[in-house]
Amino acid sequence: MEYSEKVMDHFLNPRNVGEIPDPDGSGEFGNPVCGDMTHVYIKVEDGRITDIKFKTFGCGAAIATGSMITELAVGKTLDEALAITRDDVADALDGLPPVKLHCSNLAADALYAAIRDYQAKNKDS
Ligand code: FES
């Protein structure tokens, strides 16, 4: 299986790994295909994601997509971050092998879950 240089870089040197102890929003998503799971934690200020971290119990592609989505989402407004698609993540990594495309769902859907968690907690603000 051929991985791009970007996938290998983010797999071997993942960015923003870990937890935010007191997140404004957090979410997780499990992959029904393989049973793996990714968690995303966000800090939000003035409607923008100011900090984001992820943890995954997934394969190399799940690590790389988790890492890449943190880089794509940081600094974005919540609406801009919700507009990041699974394909955007795969494209930013110069593609994923077809059998690994399902792995990019983890990062994107965990990010959406974290944003929805934040929005549910801040409905009245
Ligand atoms: Fe489970 Fe990739 S095989 S996330």
Image (cartoon, grey):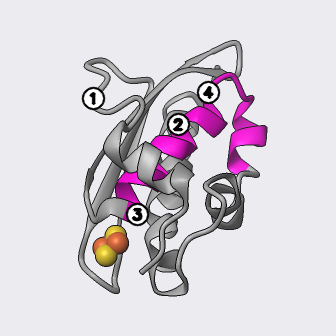
- Any atom of ligand 1 within 8 Å of the CB at mark 3? yes
Start and end of the magenta stretch?
Answer: 61-82
Say which residue label 3 marks: 61
Amino acid type, callout 3: Ala
Say which residue label 1 marks: 19
Residue 103 placed where, x, y %? 43, 71
Say which residue label 4 marks: 74
Foreground of the two, 32 or 69: 69
- For the point 71% across and 52% down, which residue is it? 84
Amino acid type, callout 1: Glu
How much space separates mark 4 and mark 3, taking CA atoms? 20 Å
What element does badge 1 sit on? Answer: loop
Amino acid type, callout 4: Val
Amino acid type, callout 2: Thr
Residue 29 visible in the picture: no
The quadrant in which the N terminus is found is bottom left
Say which residue label 2 marks: 70
- For the point 70% across and 60% down, which residue is it? 91
Mark 2 nearby-residue class (10 Å; few <14, some 14–19, many ≥20): many
Sequence-first tag of 4 and 3:
3
